[in-house]
Image (tube, rainbow, N blue to C red):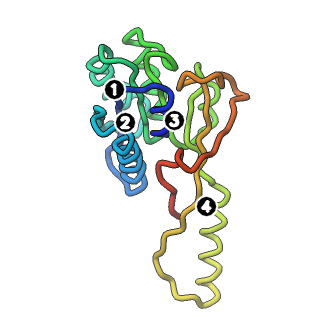
Amino acid sequence: AAEHLLDAGAEQFIVVDAAPSYRFGRARVDGFETTVRSRHPTATIHRIRADWSSPGAWRASLPALREAAASGPIGVFAISDEMAIGVYRAAADLGMRVGQDVLVVGFDDVRGAKWVQPALTTVRQPIREMAAAAIDELVAIAHGADPQARIIELPTTLVVRGSTGTSGAGPEALSRESPRDRPRRESV
């Protein structure tokens, strides 16, 4: 997500984080910020916190978008698609255009992500594979394996759509996977 926003021309960044904070949300934010800093050490990254809702993200992102508006293209990474949709509303309220003035990436690839206009670029998690890995662990425990906490890493996919200024503006948007587009791998 960070590499994609950098490649799309973002010069400053807003990270929409959530409260309460969970391990997976912190991992997403840390991965994003680390990637931005590795390519653009002096980039401005505003971290804002909101509840996990669209209205919460809308309220929290209004002042950050207003402040960043004069400084060039803004790349926004929201740790959920629900929150990214709140950023759309804040941008519209400020007369900013998503996909042009504000480049937005969400996380989760919820069903509605491809129906907002422009369609939301998002990170898709391998839900089926996550469920299968969790079931495999439970079956192993049921067969006598010692239950131990462990991290199972699975790849995510960046689904590129119109919110980052690309041509994938409709429901038929392209999917692209690249190792550098994986801000973090999700754990089960």
At x 65%, y 79%, the residue is 139
State the residue position of label 2: 16
For the residue carrying disc 4, how many other residues have a C-alpha within 10 Å: few (<14), some (14-19), or many (20+)? some
The answer to whether marks 2 and 4 mark residues whose Cβ atoms lie closer than 8 Å is: no
Which amino acid, by three-letter code, is at mark 3? His
Amino acid type for the residue under numbered disc 2: Val
> Mark 4 is on which residue type?
Met
Question: Distance of mark 3 from mark 4, alpha carbons?
Answer: 24 Å
Q: Taking 23 as reference, is 173 above or below it?
A: above
User: SS at mark 1?
Assistant: helix
Q: Does the CB distance between marks 2 and 3 fall below 8 Å?
A: no
Nearer to us in this view, 39 or 116? 39
| Distance Cα–Cα, label 2 vs label 3 | 17 Å
Is residue 149 depicted above or below 95 in this figure?
below
Picture coordinates of residue 1 (x, y %)?
49, 40
Label 3 close to label 1 by CB (< 8 Å) = no
How busy is the neighbourhood of tag 2: few (under 14 within 10 Å), some, or many (20 plus)? Answer: many
Disc on res. 61:
1
Are the residues at dot 2 and dot 1 in contact (C-beta closer than 8 Å)?
Answer: yes
> Mark 1 is on which residue type?
Ser
Count neighbours of disc 1 (C-alpha within 10 A) and say few if under 14, some if 14 to 19, many if 20 or more.
many
Separation of residues labelled 3 and 1 (CA atoms): 21 Å
Residue under pointer 3 = 4
Say whether disc 2 or disc 3 marks the residue closer to the N-terminus: 3
Q: Position of residue 110 (x, y in %)?
A: 59, 39
Counting from the top left corner in percent of width and height, residue 116 is at 59, 23
Question: In the shown orientation, is residue 185 left or right of residue 143?
Answer: left
Please tell me whether mark 3 or mark 4 is closer to you in this view: 3
**What's the CA distance linking mark 1 and mark 4?**
31 Å
Question: Can you tell which quarter of the image residue 91 is in?
Answer: top left
